[in-house]
Image (tube, rainbow, N blue to C red):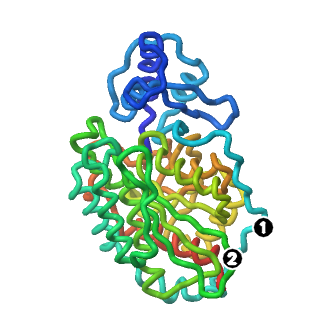
Amino acid sequence: MLQICTALVLARLAGVLASQVPLQQDSGDNALRLVRYGPGVNDTTRVHAVALDALVSGASPFSYSGLDPSLLSALAARQGPGPGFIDLTDVDLDLPKAVVLTAPYPTPNATKYPEIIEDMFPLVSATGLEWTIGNLSQEFSTRYYKSLRARDPALWLSDRFVEAVGKDNVAFLENKFNQPNVIAAIPRAEGSTNDEVIVIGGHFDSTSPIPWLRAPGADDDASGVSVILQTLQILNATGFRGARRIEAHAYAGEEGGLLGSVNTAAQYATKNTSVRAMLQFEMIGYQPTDMPVISMTIDTAPELQTFVSSLVKTYIPKTEATFRTTVCGYGCSDHDSWTQSGYSAICLAAAGPRDPELNPHYHSTADTLDKLNMTKASVFVKAALAFVVELSEKA
């Protein structure tokens, strides 16, 4: 998630630049980026690239003038993490929205899928989650999408995905910056003709006040990536194949305005790919209360909310975790990219942006593994497993 307590940085700096720098379309810092800051048709404006960089890096505010007052109002009103905007510069706004599947979501049924609890849940490993987070947050000093070695964590993740599901089921989806998305798949069962896809995601880039130097991003969002990787590992270890293809997406450039995921979702919409549902995992590791907490965003996809709420309550009893809902706001995390392209998508997190349990260390050099409790957070792997198995359905 991107810290929006610095929203005025973007607003003020963008205003200065707009009055001092000639408008031009190029690939440098003077390039104008197309930003959407709300769900409305007219909630878009153009902002200089350097202003977006200032927002990400937490630069000091400047005087401002001439800024679109609607953008200023929308971003200044936000008081928590989440970009608060989607950078749409590199996608085609004239694309038709994806056709949202109208078939109702099923009622979760643990009796129909006994393998979830009996075979998969015993394989959930807090140690495995910690190993992934430790490698991402300690082996790479920063995973910032504009850093010199921005591609390295993607290469590392690709290797881990290949170990989990095989080389033929892993691919890069390139972006216009040097950090690709990494996509891994569990193929549909042999003989299935269902072309729909189930997507789970997390973002592997990170940021901090000086993101080019050090940005460990253990919770934000190596923790979410650890969930999708372990979900793949368990699905493959148990030999599960459903009627629908299951994909795990590790997104690049979330901190720059959901860049990697908006590119991915737009490409899926262009190809008319039928995505049954998308579930994002964002900052799941900081668990300061006695009972683990699973927070579901309720800004998007009401039908999917109903399904996920029932799913969590079916597979994760109240004695194991507290389930609650939270408002995340526009541009909160990568699931909003899928909503932008017309798909049904929501997010699970440990806390919402205004919840008192929100990790106070995010976007700082203190966002490290020792602040997290992955034993508690392992309930998110259970939620991910139940989500993909129930929705992929038996062939």
- Residue type of the residue flagged with mark 1: Ala
- Is 98 situated left or right of 24 in this image? right
Image position, residue 277 (x, y; %): 63, 63
Image position, residue 284 (x, y; %): 43, 58
Q: Which type of secondary structure does the marked residue at label 1 adopt?
A: loop
The disc placed on residue 194 is 2
Distance between the alpha carbons at the discs numbered 1 and 2: 14 Å
Q: Which type of secondary structure does the marked residue at label 2 adopt?
A: loop
Foreground residue, 243 or 7? Answer: 243
Foreground residue, 357 or 345? Answer: 345
Q: In which quarter of the image is residue 88?
A: top right
- Residue type of the residue flagged with mark 2: Asn
Check the image and report above or below for 141 versus 72.
below
Check the image and report above or below for 266 versus 15.
below
The disc placed on residue 103 is 1
Residue 309 appears in the picture as rendered: no
Q: Quadrant of residue 136?
A: bottom left
